[in-house]
């Protein structure tokens, strides 16, 4: 039914769930001949590959046919552990508690502003600015550069689709980001590295008297901007879009706010902003009767795994009451050593969005003459626009 599929093509993942269902049932491992990469879909297979870090490595790149860089996500074994420990100093529980107060301030401000408007775009007016402003605060990004950073990251993400999508615009955006990073780095050195922002924390962090070098700092900075702003935006917008179409579930969150943490998990399962990440086989590996050869890449298709009927009842139903004690934990943040470092921050931002929206907004209505629009991507997918009318409580 689905033959000669180009998994790097953004359009392949536009409304992809019929295709994912086919592969989940009939062809759980598929070789993409155009890009010469494997794709896997079932939950248990994704988990097995994520956990087998001896066989499946990150250092050859986590995007299809694109080499790695010095960021921690591209490291394996002891180097990954060391680099992650240096970076994770900015994501301690204490740091996250400090973030909650600021995040709520931003969420309240954004929702109150939307309530003054006759029509809003929830992506533009809430889902994008909340994580962007928070991660920019955390990194100490200059106010006048924040919108530029958002545009550069959005452009660079398209390069993550594969080598055919690494355009001049992608490279130009990367060059612009490098210049900003160097300015921020120099400013902190000139100030004696005494600040409390994440970039300064990273510059000061040491393990066994070793620090991140300048190249590692640059790519960790880029990675945090990408993961910290883009993916959470898609989860917030996608979750609120589902709730707009399920007002009884939206009202249940208002009536019983204790449901909100569970709703956050269902939103992450449902939206799954990362379409895939890739690993490279360090040895031959047989799966479902097919052999992944050493040196070949394997794409872990998280949205398919998060709707695997072997793990979830009625997987295509959005349900904030879903009992995750009886069903599998979602894989939106990955698994194993490379589990998303910013997972706690993302959960915080989604939770606060739900809390402040349900407190202040009685109903989210999509105008009859408009509809939501999705970004087309084979890397990070989500809503591009979400027009809405908000009825205040």
Image: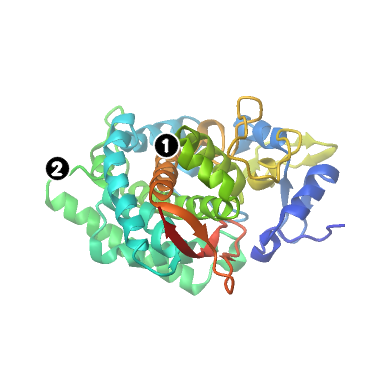
Q: Looking at the rendering, in which quadrant would you find the N terminus?
A: bottom right
Q: Relative to 337, does residue 215 appear above or below in the rendering?
A: below
Q: How crowded is mark 1: few (under 14 residues within 10 Å), some or many (20 or more)?
A: few
Residue 290 vs residue 382, the one in the foreground: 382
Residue 17 screen position, x and y as percent: 73, 53
Residue 60 visible to an observer of this rendering: no
The total of numbered circles placed on residues is 2
Q: Which of marks 2 and 1 is in front?
A: 1
Is 235 displayed left or right of 55 in the figure?
left
Residue at left 20%, top 55%?
A: 186
Is 209 displayed left or right of 120 in the figure?
left
| Residue farthest along the top direction in this orientation | 325
| Residue farthest along the front direction in this orientation | 393
Precedes in sequence: disc 2 or disc 1: 2
Residue 361 vs residue 145, the one in the foreground: 361
Q: Element type at marker 2? A: loop
Residue 384 visible to an observer of this rendering: yes
Q: Element type at marker 1? A: helix
Residue 341 vs residue 280, the one in the foreground: 341
Residue at left 50%, top 34%?
A: 259
Distance of label 2 from label 1 (alpha carbons)? 26 Å
Q: Residues within 10 Å of mark 2 (few under 14, many from 20)?
A: few
Is 8 displayed left or right of 273 in the figure?
right
Residue 22 screen position, x and y as percent: 82, 49
Residue 187 screen position, x and y as percent: 17, 55
Residue 361 vs residue 344, the one in the foreground: 361
Q: Residue 344 carries which label?
A: 1
> What residue did someone put label 2 on?
194
Residue 266 screen position, x and y as percent: 57, 40
Q: In which quarter of the image is residue 327?
A: top right
């Amino acid at each position: 039914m689905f033959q000669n599929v180009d998994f790097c093509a953004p359009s392949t993942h536009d409304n992809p769930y019929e295709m994912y269902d086919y592969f989940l049932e009939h062809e759980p491992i598929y070789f993409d001949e155009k890009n010469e990469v494997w794709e896997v879909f079932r939950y248990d297979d994704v988990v097995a590959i994520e956990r087998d870090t001896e066989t499946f490595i990150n250092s050859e790149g986590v995007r299809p046919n694109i080499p790695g860089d010095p960021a921690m996500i591209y490291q394996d074994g002891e180097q990954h552990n060391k680099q992650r420990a240096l970076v994770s100093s900015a994501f301690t529980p204490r740091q996250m508690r400090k973030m909650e107060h600021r995040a709520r301030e931003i969420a309240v401000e954004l929702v109150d502003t939307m309530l003054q408007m006759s029509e809003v775009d929830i992506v533009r007016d809430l889902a994008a600015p909340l994580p962007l402003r928070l991660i920019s605060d955390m990194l100490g990004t200059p106010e006048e550069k924040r919108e530029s950073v958002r545009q550069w990251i959005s452009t660079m993400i398209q390069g993550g689709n594969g080598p055919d999508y690494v355009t001049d615009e992608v490279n130009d955006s990367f060059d612009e980001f490098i210049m900003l990073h160097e300015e921020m780095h120099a400013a902190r050195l000139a100030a004696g590295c005494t600040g409390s922002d994440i970039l300064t924390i990273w510059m000061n962090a040491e393990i066994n008297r070793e620090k991140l070098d300048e190249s590692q700092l640059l790519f960790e900075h880029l990675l945090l901007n990408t993961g910290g702003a883009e993916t959470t935006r898609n989860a917030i917008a996608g979750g609120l879009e589902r709730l707009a179409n399920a007002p009884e579930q939206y009202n249940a969150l208002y009536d019983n706010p204790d449901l909100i943490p569970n709703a956050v998990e269902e939103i992450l399962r449902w939206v799954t902003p990362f379409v895939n990440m890739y690993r490279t086989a360090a040895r031959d590996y047989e799966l479902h009767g097919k052999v992944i050869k050493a040196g070949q890449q394997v794409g872990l298709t998280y949205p398919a795994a998060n709707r695997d009927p072997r793990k979830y009842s009625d997987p295509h139903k959005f349900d904030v009451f879903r009992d995750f004690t009886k069903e599998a934990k979602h894989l939106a943040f990955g698994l194993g050593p490379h589990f998303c470092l910013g997972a706690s921050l993302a959960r915080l931002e989604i939770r606060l969005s739900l809390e402040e929206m349900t407190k202040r907004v009685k109903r989210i209505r999509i105008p009859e003459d408009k509809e939501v629009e999705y970004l087309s991507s084979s890397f990070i997918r989500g809503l591009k626009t979400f027009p809405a009318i908000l009825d205040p409580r």
